[in-house]
Each structure stands twice: as structure tokens, then as C-alpha cells.
Image (cartoon, grey):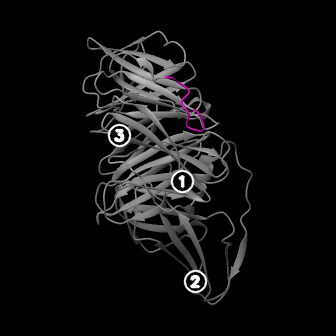
Amino acid sequence: MEGLAIATFPVEAAAISGESLQFRTVLENRGETPLRVPSPNSPSQFAYELQPQREGGRVYKVSAADRNRRRSVHLPAPVQVQYEMLSPGRRLEWVEDLADFLNEGIEPGKYFVTAQYLAAAATSPKAGVAVLPAKVESLSSAVSGSSLTSVLAHRREDGGVTLLQRESLVDPRETVFYRRQGLPAGGPVAVAVAIDVAPAGAGRWFAWLRDRKLTASVGWGDRTILTSEAVPVEASEPELLSPGFQVAVGTALFGVVDRKGGAVHLVTYLAGSSGLKRHWVASLTSSGAATVRWNCQPDGSVTVVWEEPASGRLLSRGFGPDGRSVDDAPRVLSNSRLAAWSVVPSGAFTVSALGEVRGSYRYAQLGAGAAADPGAVAELAGATAWGFCLSGDHVSIVAATGAGIWQTKPGEAWQSVVEIKDPHRLHVFSMPRGSSWMEWVESGYGIRRAKLP
């Protein structure tokens, strides 16, 4: 198409792997006669190539057409492309998200990017962009309804922290992180995303704890809707529980564990349109608590589970929506120290427990009733993290070692599912329709996700 010029430029010079990566693409008529080109209101007609600037790197070829085809459960109805006449000297502009065209993060590195308008056999000059590894200081990720919702704190080179939020589709590899907050250099940052336990309307709340101050924000898509003022947390070493819970329309519940000697308290906060406010405070135990996790019900009642440091016993206590204890004393879930355990954060209260007996493992589900019959689990040397994926009456047990990630079920042998050096922050979860997934942080890259066999 004589006289048609194409160019593409990154909106930002660098992005974090897994984050939105927007490019501005321009068509310009440098000829003397009008040209028929697609309207910016039509589906994208461009294809992009990300060519690594170093030898041996991966080449990415992406387009909106490929993304839409991949995300469509059924064949989509054809969308007719609209055209308009581009007069001499005039230009049209598109802003497109190349990271969103993929279903995975882009490998960190420097890339040359070109845009192609195939209908005119036009290719843009190269544009440079850098993709940075996500340096994950903290991560909160949980299933909410039909999506995987996540928030992470990325530690920047200047010592500051960038908070990013993401809402997936049914396939948790789809969609991207968006930047929500930039924090100056300072202490560690802990984050917690809020999952739905009741209809909560549009928007996803999350909170962060830094230097004994708690802040909450709500975002959706590529925008931040509201951010609260920071609230002082009166505790010497507070711990933010993950996840939080969206308990009503526009309202989220967050919890902070306060340890004072052997006494352990749960301090709750409500986030809403009027800001972040302290809610109720409850005593958990006077004998200390190591790891603390919780489960929330639609009415706002919670069950808190913790490990007693001295004995290793697993204890729990329930609280109503107003913070009143529903138990006269903590309930004993396990009389001995466990190798690993987790709590289903919403829905039926269930604890997955992996006990170690003379070098071998036993798996059981603990809840309001009696424990299920323990299932034998084969030994696995060097496990550094564990995860449990519940789907109906079945459980998959996943473990990370220095050499990769492994999976088994009670009574079966371990099988390797990912060979990778030192994966950490392992998270295993089930999506609707029964699919099981895992995600982990890989040093020098960021977050990776994969479907379990």
C-alpha cells in the first residue's frame, strides 16, 4: 500500500514480567492519495514480534487475534472489520497490550519489537523495550469464584516497592498484572488480597502492611478505584493474614495477628468506601502461635487455626461476625506436630494435614467432624514447601524441592511435574470445572503457573 508507514513504541520503557506491556502503534499516510485502513474501533489487525537482543533468547509472536481465539470457549461470531479513509498527512493510533496477548509472562530481558500490518505487507522499524524480573517480596494469591486473584509486592532496584494486582480468567495463566501503588524505600511489605465470600460488587480489595501501618485499596482492570488512609497497627511484630475476604458489597475484612509474649490476638479491619477502620479484637491463645491461617463464611464469621510452638499441636477457634468466640476454649485438631497443613480459606471449613510418622507421611482432612481415615503418602527427600489441591473427594499433594516440583496422591508414587532449581512460594489450587493448578516464584524470572497432570 504505497505511502502507508507503520511505527510502534512502548508506552513505558520497561515492564515487570507478567505485567501489562503496552505499545502505541501508528499508521500514517505519507502519500498523496487517501488510503483505506482499519478503524481503531475494529478488532486489532496487527501482529507483533518480540525479538531478544541477546542470542539464544525466546522469540514471541503475538496478536489480539490469537488471544481472542485462545480465550473463546466456543467459536466466536465473526466481527466485521470496519475501515475508513486515511487522508494524506493524517495518522491513526492504537494502544495494545502485548503481555495480555500471551497466556504467560514474558521472559526477562531486552527485546526489539516490530509491528506488522499484514494486509499491506507493512512492518514497523524496531523499538526497544526491557522486561524486568519480578522480585517478589510478598505474594497473596487465591481463588475467588471463577478467577485466580493475586497481588504482589515487587522490590525495585531503588529500594522502593511496587504493588501489582491481577484478576485471571478461567485459565489462570490469562491476563496481566497492573500497577496499583508505588511505595518509597523502606521496610518489608506484606500483602493480602480479598476473595469473595459474599456478593461484593465490582472491584477487588487488597491490603498491605508496612512499618506497622495498614492500608487498603480497591482496583479493577487497569484502574485503582479507591485507596484508604494508612491506619496505625498497635503491635510490635504484626502479621497480615492472607487472604482477606470481601464480606459485603464494597466491603472487605482483613486480619492482623498481634503477638505479645505468649498472648496472641486477632485484630480485624473493615475496608469500605469510608476508608479502613478497626473492627473487632479477639484473643486466640496465651501459649503462643507459630503459623496462623483462617477461614471465613458469608456472614463474616471466621475460624482461625494456628500451630502451638512448644507442642506442635494444631488448634482452632471460631468467632462470630461481631468477634464473639463460639468456642469456650481452643479446639484441638492435631495432637502432634505436622509436616505441613493448610486451611481452605472459604466454603466448608477443611484442614489438610500431613503428619510424619517414623519417616513416612500420612494425609488426613480435619474439620468440624472426625478426621478422615489417614492415607499413606510416600516419602520425598528434601521437600521445602507443600501444597494441597482439593477437588471433590480427591486430593493432590504437591511438594517443592531444590530440583523442582513433585506431585502425588495417597497410595501413589511421586512424579516430577516441573524441573526447576529452587522454586519457592509454592501455591496449589483448584479452578472451577475441576482443573488443578500450581504457581511458584522462580528467581530471576517471577511468577510461573502450570496445570497439574
Could you tell me how far apart the alpha carbons at marks 1 and 3 are, in whole angstroms?
A: 20 Å
Kindly identify the amino acid type of the residue bearing the numbered disc 2: Gly
Could you tell me how far apart the alpha carbons at marks 1 and 2 are, in whole angstroms?
A: 61 Å
Q: Which mark is residue 259?
A: 3
Q: Residue at x 40, y 17 (%)?
A: 334
Q: Residue at x 46, y 26 (%)?
A: 316
Q: Which mark is residue 86?
A: none
Q: Position of residue 77 (x, y in %)?
A: 74, 51
Kindly indicate the quadrant of the structure image that contains residue 312: top left
Between 22 and 165, which is closer to the camera in this rendering?
Answer: 165
| Helix, strand or loop at mark 1 | strand
Image height of 164 relative to 307, above or below: below
Between 58 and 415, which is closer to the camera in this rendering?
Answer: 415
Kindly identify the amino acid type of the residue bearing the numbered disc 1: Lys
> Total marks drawn?
3
| Helix, strand or loop at mark 2 | loop
Q: Position of residue 166 (x, y in %)?
A: 51, 52
Image height of 345 relative to 221, above or below: above
| Quadrant placement of the N terminus | bottom right
Please indicate, yes or no, whether residue 365 appears anywhere in the rendered image.
yes
How packed mark 3 is, by other alpha carbons closer than 10 Å (few <14, some 14-19, many 20 or more), is: many
Mark 3 and mark 2 lie on one chain; the one further toward the N terminus is: 2
Instruction: Return the residue at label 1.
Output: 277
Instruction: Return the residue at label 2.
Output: 3
Q: Quick check: marks 1 and 2 in contact, CB under 8 Å? A: no
**What segment carries the magenta color?**
320-328
Q: Main secondary structure of the magenta part?
A: loop
Mark 1 and mark 3 lie on one chain; the one further toward the N terminus is: 3
In the picture, measured across the screen, residue 436 lies left or right of residue 77, that is left
